[in-house]
Amino acid sequence: MKKKIFIVIALLLIFSVFCGIIYLNNVFLPTKAKKLLADTLTQSLHYNVEIGKIKYSLIRGFIINDIVIYDKTKDKENTLLTVKETSCHILFLPLIKERKIIIPVIHIDSPYLYIRYQKDNNFNFSRVFSLKDKPQDKPGVKLSFFIYKINIFNGSGTFQDEHFEPKFTRTIQDFSMGFNLKPIDKVAFLTQAKIISDKQTITKVSGEGEYGFFSKELNAKISLANLILPEFNPYFRGLPFSIATGAVENGKFELKFKDGLANLKGSLAVKGLALGKGNLNLTGDINIVPELSYDRKKDIFNYQANLQLLQANLTGIQYINKLNNISGDIGLTNDRIWTNNLKLQALDCAFLLNGAIENLINPSLKANLTCEQLNLEKLFSILPSKPKGFNLSGTSKTRIDIEGPINKLPLGIKANLELKDAKIEAALLKDPLKNINGKIDLTTDTLKWTDLSFNYLDTAYTSIGKLASFNAPQLNFTLTSKELDLASDIKIKNDLIKINALTGKYLDSKFNIKGNIDTQDRANPMLDMYAEVNLKPEDAFGFLPPALAENLKKIKPQGILNIKGALKGKAPAYKDWEASLTATAPTFSVYGLKLTEFSIEAAQKNGILKVVPLTASAYSGVISLNFISDLKPALPEYALKFDASRIELAKLKSDTEFKNQDIAGTLSLTADLKGNFNGPDSLKGQGAISVKNGKLWQLNLFKGLGELFLLSDYEKIVFKEASADFVVNDKNISTDNLKLASDQMKLNCQGQLGFDGALGFTVYTEVNKELIRDSSDIRKFTAAILGGLSDALTIKVSGTIQDPKYKIVPVAADLIKNLKDFILGK
């Protein structure tokens, strides 16, 4: 019986529930409950709420379909939220006993949320969080309302920011979120979604946190992946650079928001980043640890970050152009960028960089770079200005300090170099400076060097000096080698080289040079020079035009000349120089002949070179020379007048090959000659020579004559007079009146002496008969039996000065030869 009663009661309950559900789904829920819920939500959310349908299921509880929340009108712009379906269970026992509506879980299926950040800095749903206009409590039964959890799935939405033009818009898909309502005023959440850009790029976002309704404080942790940075460029406009490419491969952040102040901290790995500012572009992979804040009320954006660069590249740097393989940490704030240990490649060298950029609005750079092996040619190429034709190459251990405003280039650059086997090429150098080693301090406008050594033209040099102002260089340096000791003071402006002083010593010569060199025509620089030189002539041969040097070498000049000279003209065109020169020397020699009180005055103008005069004392006599040459023809010609008087041969012979022979006399010589710079073979002219109180028999020419005459005392013959007029022509010196006279003999000569020493003379002799008669020598006897010899004997002289040959012209020559051979036992 009891069992039947229980079954009946159960059936009645089921029937009642069934009837109740039918009533709810067909009467109460579609009418009263739907309107009540819509009105309540409208008052609570401060936005219009419409509900499509409400029903009840024993399994799923209350099911609400097609919820629409909108502002003003139900169109696209004003609709905030649409929900396809919401379901939940209500705990009826607390409702009956305590008048509490407790919902353990609300399931929200396929919501679509439209979020719009408006120009008034409010969101389109901001009234939801307003505490104003709270719904008034109505008289009657009071109900408490609690929701412990909300699950949202299959959500989507649109975010739009009206602060930009065009509006920034992103689509949200696969949105899911779980809310856990905490007592009084907080809600905890867990969410994930996909953000899709206009280019259909998918960014994955997940987060968790909590929000306080009364405090309006948000605390959240956010993770994201595949965030394409350029697609969010509108939010990066406050940065001092633009973002061209880059994707956040993964990132984690902590976000706090309260009273309009947002703070974000986190870390992210960015791949393929490309940042730009003006001509500067940074590319590479970067790990970033950012800390950002935004005050919405004051519209102030602040940030700081640590950037770890991985094999990045920076281009667009003036002069340097590109930095490669940048690795290390960079600090970044609103107004400063810095690094303490950044490795990079620049100018074909590995650098270590320390420095900072201050004041990013008007940025100023201060940094230093160090390099163990810098390419000097690359370094020199970045200088904003440098001398024309000047090149520096090689390697160096280097420190470079850079300082100055980036917006007002060029930057101030200081470099300390320790050169290793470097090379310098310059327009005025015949050959590069090689094997350069030493220390150089370089700025954008100065070059200093100390302990510098190098090789030039196979000679080792050392130097210290300074080159100031590359636009108008001031050059001061010393230069030392085994042959040279030089100090300079030189200024260069545009193409003009002004030599204020160039003093020193080269070999045995000292010099002090001043003047200007105009290098506008680099192949033909214009000279305007003045010099005071103590010159040893052979020291200058390497600096003279080759043809002039060769001609000077032939005359074998020796001594120290005290020279003062000036010249104007183009360096290679020495024939066109306008020049003047005076030179003196206490002693000087030419062809080995010694001169004293040597003095010369020379001038060149309009292609005419004049020496007026050259004077000197020599061997108790004096000499003078006047010289004039027209340098304009391809083969210049010259004319000279030479005069020598009172020359003591006994003294002169000591400087010749005859120094061991008994030669004496007083020589006078005049010559008026012409020729060209091809050499002495071109000489033509005439002159006269005389010797008084002479003693010439030991000359090869006269010694042979004495032997031929069979005179044993020929060496004692002293000529009181010797004279001749001569003509120079066709490489010969010819005469028809050479006379030598003494008490013992007279010689009358006609013929010529070649420049090569060849002899071609006819000698007419007259021998004193008394000399033959008084001699006891057998040779005098032979002469006596040939009485005709005492009156006239004609002899042909040939051969050379060194080896003369003699031939007697009369018919009796054979008899004389046979007699001579008999007596001598041949």
Image (spheres, rainbow, N blue to C red):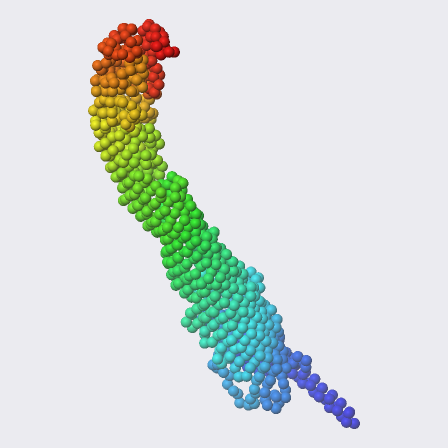
Asked if residue 76 is positioned above or below residue 653 in the image, the reply reads below
Q: Residue furthest right?
A: 1
- Percent x, y of residue 670: 23, 22
Figure quadrant of residue 83: bottom right
Q: Nearer the viewer, residue 350 or 230?
A: 350
Q: Quadrant of the C terminus?
A: top left
205 relative to 487 in the view: left or right: right
Q: Quadrant of the N terminus?
A: bottom right
581 relative to 436 in the view: left or right: left
Q: Residue furthest bottom?
A: 1
339 relative to 771 in the view: left or right: right
Inspect this view and state whether residue 518 appears. Answer: no
Q: Residue at x 30, y 34 (%)?
A: 537
Figure quadrant of residue 16: bottom right
Q: Residue at x 22, y 29 (%)?
A: 617
Inspect this view and state whether residue 325 appears. Answer: yes
- Percent x, y of residue 28: 63, 83
- Percent x, y of residue 738: 25, 15
Asked if residue 398 is positioned above or below residue 176 in the image, the reply reads above
- Percent x, y of residue 128: 51, 77
Q: Residue furthest front?
A: 776
